[in-house]
Image (spheres, rainbow, N blue to C red):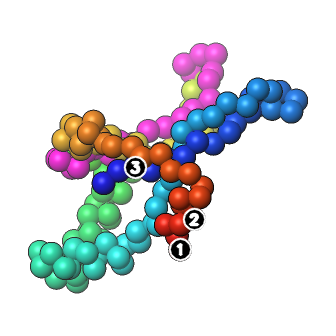
Amino acid sequence: MSVKFKAIPKGYPGVVGGGVTKYYANIVRGEKIDFRDLLVEIEELNVVHPGVFLAVLEAFLRKTNQHLLNGRAVHLGQLGTFYPSISSSSAESEDEVSSNSIRRFKIIYRPSALLQEGLDHVKFEKVSDASREENAA
């Protein structure tokens, strides 16, 4: 298995005509796997009945959301950790910082050391537009 990429041209933003064009590696994402497809794959492993899996996942999502909305990190062992995070506007003094200063609440995901270790061994394969079209046919 490998991650496919292709070279794409990019100019400089803000420069009339784009300036000097440079080429950068850009990932070629395969077909998106939706939840139903993933559920079928898990079912084929005969690990757990799909209904049980769906019920556990639904409960997991509800409880994870509850903890994140209470400002708590959710550690998922070998999967990694979800952290709540905020972005705010600056203020001249501490007293000026209020809940109105907060512009965005988001969730940050950090993979575990085990998952990150797997990324250290990723293989890359350069593809051209012509080879992508052949694979699609």
Mark 2, Cα crowd under 10 Å, few <14 / some 14-19 / many 20+, is few
Mark 1, Cα crowd under 10 Å, few <14 / some 14-19 / many 20+, is few
> In this orientation, which residue lies closer to the viewer: 93 or 52?
52
Residue 133: x and y in percent read 57, 65
Element under disc 3: strand
> In this orientation, which residue lies closer to the viewer: 32 or 50?
32
Specify the amino acid type for callout 2: Glu
Residue 106: x and y in percent read 47, 45
Reading the image, the residue beneath label 2 is: 133
Horizontal placement of 11 versus 92: left or right? right
Pointer 3 with pointer 1, Cβ within 8 A: no
Mark 3, Cα crowd under 10 Å, few <14 / some 14-19 / many 20+, is few
Q: Looking at the rendering, which quadrant does residue 59 occupy? A: bottom left
Pointer 2 with pointer 1, Cβ within 8 A: yes
Reading the image, the residue beneath label 3 is: 3
Q: Residue at x 32, y 64 (%)?
A: 62
Magenta range is 76-95
> In this orientation, which residue lies closer to the viewer: 83 or 130?
130
In the image, residue 46 sits, relative to residue 111, either above or below, namely below
Specify the amino acid type for callout 3: Val
In the image, residue 49 sits, relative to residue 29, either above or below, namely below
Pointer 3 with pointer 2, Cβ within 8 A: no
Residue 18: x and y in percent read 80, 32
Q: Which corner quadrant holds the N terminus?
A: bottom left
Q: Which mark is residue 137?
A: 1
Residue 27 belongs to magenta span: no
Specify the amino acid type for callout 1: Ala
